[in-house]
Structures are given as C-alpha cells and as structure tokens.
Amino acid sequence: MTLLDPSTIILMSALMGGAMSVVLFAADRSFPAEIRGLGHWAVGLLLLIAAAVLFNLRGVLPPALALLSANSMLLWGLGLSMVGTERFYHRPPSWRAFHLVWGLGMSAIACWLLVWPDFQARVAVFSFLVFGFYARQVQLIWRYGERHFSTRFFGALMLFQTLAVLLRGCLALFGSATSVDLMRGGPFASFYLATANFMVLLLAVGFMTVATRRLQSILELRSTLDPLTCVLNRRGFADIYGKERAQLRRAARGMTLLSIDLDFFKQINDQYGHAMGDRVLVHVAATVGKTLRESDHMARFGGEEFVVLLPDTGVERAIGAAERIRVALRGPHPEGMPAYTVSIGVACQQSAAEDLDGLLMRADAALYRAKANGRDRIEVAEPASPPASMLHAIRA
Ligand SMILES: Nc1nc2c(ncn2[C@@H]2O[C@H](COP(=O)(O)OP(=O)(O)OP(=O)(O)O)[C@@H](O)[C@H]2O)c(=O)[nH]1
C-alpha cells in the first residue's frame, strides 16, 4: 500500500473528519444557542465518514450498491454543511432546494450507473451538484461574513474547494475518463484526492474558526449588557460615553445625562416579591427605550438606578425627554404590576473637560434633590464648574 493509495487517502480524511465532528458536536453543546449550524456540520462530517466506509466496501457489497449509497451519503453530508452555514449566518435553510438537488442528482447518477453506464457523466453530475453546495456557501460568506480574518480564512478555503470541484466537473465533461478517475491515480486525481483529504479537515477547522470568533463577539457583547434588562451595564455605558465625549466639540448643544431612580422600590420588593421587582425593572427598561431616539443610550447601573445619555442635546430638550420618560413610567402599567414612579436628575455636559464621574455626580446630586423634594419629579443639576486651569486663565 503506497502513501497515495486512494482508499487510504479517503479513509484518512474520514478519520480526520470524524475527529473534527466530535469537536463540532462538543462546540454545538457548549456554545450559546445564537451560534447555529454546528450540529449540521457535525452530522455532515459523520455522513462523509459513512460514505468513505461504504466506498471502501466496494469489494464486499455489490459495487453498484456501495457506489450509489456512498455517493448519496457524500452528497447529503455536503448538503448538510451548506444548511449548517446557512443557519450560521441566520439565513432560512434551503431544505427544499437541497432535497430537490439531492433527489434529481441521485436519480441521474443511478441512471448513468445502472442504465447507461457512463463514468464521466456521473462525475460531472456529482461535481456540479457539489459545486452548487459550495458556491452557495461562498456567496453566504461573501455577503454576510464579518470583515475579520476568520471569515477570510473560511471564505478562501471554501472558494478553493469550490474551484477544485468545478475543475473536476469540467475535466469530466471535456477531458478523458482517466483524468478524473480518482481510483486510477494520475496527476489531477492525486492532486484532487490530496486536497480533498486536507479540505475535509480544513473546512471544518475554518467553520470552527468563524464559530469561535462569533462566540468571542457574543461574550464581549454580553459583558457590556445587563443580564436582566438587556440594556447596557456600567462598563458598556462607559465605552459609549467615552466615544460621545470625544465628539463633544462637534455637538454645539453638548450632551445630557439623565439619572433615573425608582421611588420606594424596596416597598415593591417587600410587598410583591423580588420576582415582581425584577418585572418592574424590565418594564422600566422597555418603556424608557421606547421614548428614546436611536442615537440615545440607556444603561442600568445595578439596583433600581438607570441612566440615559442624550448626545447633542441641551438642557431644555433634555428636560422634555425626561418628562416624557417620567410620564410614560407613571402608567398605565401592565395588569398585575403595582403602580410606581421615578425621580430624575438631569445634568448637561458642555465641555470635554468633565469626565463621566463628574457628570454622574452632578446628575445624582440633582436626583437626590428630586427625592428630597417629594419624588416623582425632575431636577436639573448646576452647570459644571470650569476646571481650575480655565478659572486661572479667566482671572488673568
Ligand atoms: N427585584 C430586584 N430588586 C433589586 C435589584 N437590585 C436592587 N434591588 C432592590 O432595590 C431596593 C432599593 O432600595 P432603596 O435603595 O431603599 O431605594 P427605594 O426603596 O427605591 O427608595 P428611594 O430610592 O429613596 O425612593 C432594595 O430593596 C434592593 O434589594 C434587582 O436586581 N432586582
């Protein structure tokens, strides 16, 4: 048995595919549900192994049966990978097209195997069907893939495999039978088998790479969100604030921060239970979100304290926005939810000299005033005092 014995190559790729399918199955079980398609890829690889085993049973099983079942498994497995990639990019899986292609393709292959035996026609049909599955994935990666190394890696592999399959289909159509007969060797057959061998593994690795990148993005996003209300948490808000502050010079009106705090929230928890308290917090986030513009940002700083950043908004308009929020939160509340109100502190930032801590301190001071003055109301903070260096310049 030589190193390039076709059966050995096919078996080797099947073994590597098997190992990779275990990795994909494990990832499917442990990755968040938003990362779809891993299971389809894992099952697809298992079918490729089954195809390799059947292919190698040509001497044991009737050859026609072994070839037909191996081809059908191979086509099914590759189609499943395509569906997996579609699901990964949150596209509707094209099951109908897949079944149609598989059914028609297998009928054609069966005809050219059993009725009018024609090896080249079979190879051409098979290659063009597989080409369709791969080309669809190239299109998905190109259109929906994130601009990142992982996508470029996966896309390049997929493109390479697509072209290799297309080349084999064209050779089957226009070349000689020996040039595409993988079992008889020859330069193209050896090249094709060797690449197919690595591609089985590499494509799965490529898919795992984009899935892992997606996992990283999801975890990064989650670390900036409040798990209960799904609005930004303090960390996420600080990032956004930093970006808005950097653009402050361009916004003539400055930006305004609203510090929103539920009134007597402890009583709601004590009287109706913590679960109802949580429902109220979710309701606050949803209701405030509906009153905001797309460019505004809301965050929950833990407990019953929310903040809203209104970029390019002066104090007059911010008071209007705060009033809309206060009135919207006063009710009517969903059935079964106790009535509640909020107090709001408003602080406007005009210069990039002030930082988030300073702005929050002023907004909180206004909020405490709102609480002290009877709650369910809005108070506006004093403007920030100019930094010491500026005072010095003014006096000079
Ligand atoms: N349900 C729920 N309650 C929380 C959460 N985080 C903090 N709390 C509760 O929020 C309540 C805050 O109480 P206080 O700080 O006394 O504020 P308050 O009762 O709203 O009173 P004022 O702010 O003065 O009007 C406490 O009972 C906390 O246990 C949470 O995630 N879920």
Image (cartoon, helix red, strand yellow):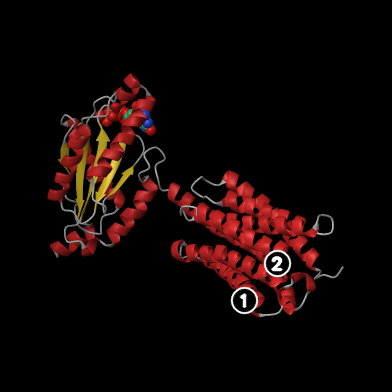
In the image, farthest residue toward the left: 316
Amino acid at the residue labelled 1: Cys
Q: Residues within 10 Å of mark 1 (few under 14, many from 20)?
A: some
Q: Where is residue 78 shown, x and y percent of the image?
A: 61, 58
Q: Which residue is mark 1?
A: 170
Q: Nearer the N terminus, badge 2 or badge 1?
A: 2
Relative placement, left or right, of 365 versus 58 is left
Q: Is residue 208 visible?
A: no
Residue 199 seen in this snapshot: yes
Estimate the spatial distance between the alpha carbons at disc 2 and disc 1, rounded to whole Å.
20 Å
- Tag 2: residue type? Trp
Q: Position of residue 359 (x, y in %)?
A: 25, 49
Residue topped by disc 2: 116
In the image, residue 12 sits, relative to residue 2, either above or below, namely above
Ligand 1's quadrant? top left
Q: Position of residue 244 (x, y in %)?
A: 28, 58
* Between 246 and 205, the one nearer to me in the picture: 205
Q: Where on the picture, by quarter, is residue 48?
A: bottom right
Residue 166: quadrant of the picture: bottom right
- Secondary element at tag 1: helix
Task: Say whether mark 2 is within 8 Å of ligand 1.
Answer: no
Percent across and percent down for residue 363 are 23, 44
Quadrant housing the C terminus: bottom left
